[in-house]
Image (cartoon, rainbow, N blue to C red):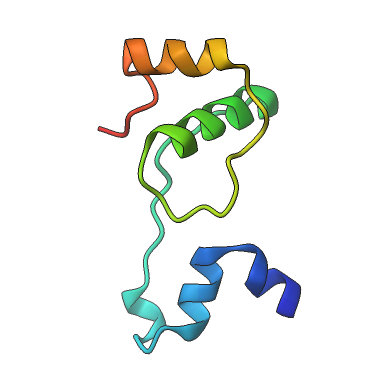
Amino acid sequence: MEEAVSSSVVVEHVVACLYPDDQVTVTKMHHEPFFRLRKLKEALYIRHNRCINRDEGVGISVTWSAVAVETDCATIQ
């Protein structure tokens, strides 16, 4: 249990939060059925948006990162 709590900032927040369970919500931003494409999109979102993730997602090349910045495709609207 300790490892699960320390691996995610969201889980850590929910465990430490004083709010009732019905006041904590999680929203799915996007559905991507293909695992590798999902991990790529996740890494771009993490790198180009303010978030509470502790890691940067999967490794992506500088080229993909530059494309994401130029096209603004990784910004959460």
Which residue, as the protein is rendered here, is positioned at the far left?
Answer: 77
Snapshot quadrant of residue 2:
bottom right
Above or below residue 66? Residue 7 is: below
Which residue, as the protein is rendered here, is positioned at the far front?
Answer: 62
Identify the residue shown where x is 56% and y is 54%.
54
77 left or right of 50?
Answer: left
Above or below residue 76? Residue 74 is: above
- The image shows residue 39 at horizontal and vertical percentages of 62, 31
Q: Is residue 6 visible?
A: yes
Snapshot quadrant of residue 38:
top right
- The image shows residue 25 at horizontal and vertical percentages of 37, 65
Of the 4 image quadrants, the one containing the C terminus is: top left
34 left or right of 24?
Answer: right
Identify the residue shown where x is 34% and y is 11%.
70
Q: Is residue 1 visible?
A: no
Q: Nearer the viewer, residue 30 or 16?
A: 16
Of the 4 image quadrants, the one containing the N terminus is: bottom right
Q: Nearer the viewer, residue 46 or 41?
A: 46
- The image shows residue 6 at horizontal and vertical percentages of 65, 71
Identify the residue shown where x is 59% and y is 25%.
40
- The image shows residue 14 at horizontal and vertical percentages of 47, 76
